[in-house]
Amino acid sequence: MNGAQHILEAFHQHSINTVFGYPGGCIMPLYDALVDDVDVEHVLCRHEQACALAADGYARASGELGVCIATSGPGATNLITGVANAHRDSIPMLVITGQVPSGLIGTDAFQETDVLGMTLGIVKHSYLVESADELPAIMEEAIELAQSGRPGPVWIDIPKDVLLTEAQALPSKPTTSIETSAPDLFTAIDMLRAARKPLLYSGGGISLAHAEEAFRQFAAASGLPSVVTLKGIGNGGKRDPNHLGMLGMHGSRAANRAVDECDLLLVIGARLDDRATGKLDTFAPNARIIHIDADAAEINKLKAADLSLRGDLTSILYGLTGELKKHPLAIEEWRKQCRTWHATGGFNTADNEEPLAPITGPAFVRQLSRIAPDDTIIACDVGQHQMWVAQYYQFDHPRHHLSSGGLGTMGFGLPAAIGAQFANPASTVINVAGDGSFMMNAQELATIRRYNLPLKLIILDNQCLGMVRQQQELFYNNRESHIDLNDNPDFVAMARAFDIPALHIERTDQIRRGIETILAYDGPMLLHVAIAREENVWPIVKPGASNREMIDESQRTRKANKEHVA
Amino acid sequence: MNPTTHPNNAGIYAIACTMTHEAAAMERLCQVIRIRGFRIVQMAVDAAGENLNIALTLEGTRPIAMLKTQLEKLHTVGEVVLQAPMAKTKTA
């Protein structure tokens, strides 16, 4: 077997049967090998960035490894945003690129870039393969590494001659499992029992560790009021009575208030990032902190923990659950208080009863949540619509909510939805996009058509970059700068040009029919939803401010704005 | 904090690092040191078979323990040893 055939052999060995890619000069030997392979489905996207983002969506929705392939030079550089996106959100991904032949590296050859050098900061690890004989071992190590411990993208850059050379497989290096410290469960239990106002704070680490069931059992046994990060949405399911919603910049008042008043914060699979904590000095000021994570580097990174448990989340959570089942926590007053806050300070914006009224983002998302099946996968883009989905859609599982958290990549949603649909062919998959984000990877309408994916596409179109406009209004004295998109294309006609049927709605009484129509259609369909330009995401915390300083619509005045510009 | 600015309250640290000698090993190490807020004051590298032994003197205002855990995450890093705190050499 040559190097290219060894790559496919590794795919077979690891049951990798779907990859996303785009061919080109230096990766041609691998594409030549694909001609004879019937076990690996290669999905041809229309841009390499979409290949990486589709692989990301595939991995998020399935919990399995996402794989993307591109050629050298521009093929590799186009992948970078998608790989960085996976890196920031710890998504298991294998990236394979062709490189110019070994003898031409460093000669400024056609389509040569220093891929290894330019990607160091956005990968868990990367390789430049120097001989065909080492390729099989590198493939094994890379596939293992991408999925172990804290997952992440691993990039293999392979010179064209290596792909063509017959390879004798060298023995793989033994992989060593990551050592974990012995979790001090009893100390954690003692701290929980001593607390009067303990709060559970979970993030994307739960699903990354495949610990969803263990988490739910722990949440039920502990009865702790809980908040989630953007990536933790769905951790507790949609019927968790103690759930207070998302915390942070666009979090609920209930969630932020509970964090502010708790006396013990149990952080599980979350990294205390700035969008969640706001100003760190004032975050959870009265709380002792227990931090549970798979990654030692996250412990004490931003906020010191009073106790840290590092290791396999499932084992730790089951250990804690066992102790709490024997003697439940006595925190009924605190639970009751949190439920009261949730009833008055959750995301409970009333539906608009006026049938001819313009559609609002929250009202649309609430209706979508009511109508779509429980196992629907929503892939968001980035912006106001992303926050409305986070606030108003009731997710039953974290793998149903695909959102670019760390990097905030506009253009993520459409290719991620493609990946999710390949991972779950029988599920309803919906891309909820804004008009700005949709245009960043709109070429992938061709991919949807080519594979006849039954994706549902929803564009909440406010004819501007709404999140930027909102911050310019609130924090820059309403000085709008380059956010106007009132020359958007006719999205309905655009979809139809790709042979995808489309509908336009703009009034409240059209919401239900619009959603039901696209969900019932047997194939891809687009719903274009016109919403008001001036609509904002509420509440909001100014970047860098304390989560106590939430601004809501009642403060939408010039005076209030000026105060917050200071 | 801007990682490229090092005010006079920056600490000076010595660390010893062992890592696999493979493509871009040193670049990877230096990249993490920079992005996590430290500046390299001195560096000595000794190639020993498949390994690199690296002695570093670093300057920075962030906790050195945070950098140590980030370096230990690198796949090719075998060991990072934080040596005794060094006397501050910069003056106000």
Image (tube, helix red, strand yellow):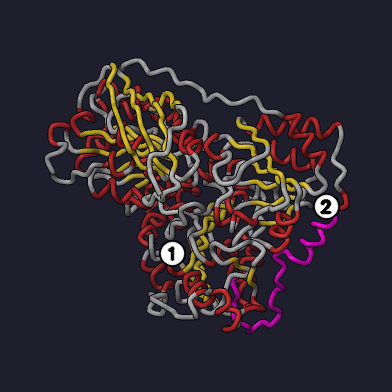
Q: Residues within 10 Å of mark 2 (few under 14, many from 20)?
A: many
Kindly identify the amino acid type of the residue bearing the numbered disc 2: Arg
In the rendering, at what x and y percent does residue A526 appear? 48, 66
Q: Is residue A128 or residue B88 the one in the foreground?
A: B88
Please tell me which residue lies in front, B8 or A299: B8
- According to the picture, the residue beneath numbered tag 2 turns out to be A335
Q: Earlier in the sequence, mark 2 or mark 1?
A: 2
Q: Judging from the image, what secondary structure is the residue with disc 2 in?
A: helix
Q: Quadrant of residue A346?
A: bottom right
The residue that appears at 38% across and 24% down in the rendered structure is B18
Kindly identify the residue that appears in the image at 38 percent across and 27 percent down. B76
Q: Mark 2 belongs to which subunit?
A: A
The residue that disc 1 covers is A437
Q: Is residue A340 left or right of residue A557?
A: right
- Give, as a three-letter code, the residue at label 1: Ser
Q: Quadrant of residue A69?
A: top left
Q: Report how far apart the C-alphas of labels 2 and 1 lie in the structure.
A: 39 Å
Position of residue A307 in the picture relative to residue A331 (left or right): left
Rendered residue at 30%/18% (across/down): B50
What is the span of residues highlighted in magenta in the rendered image? A334-361
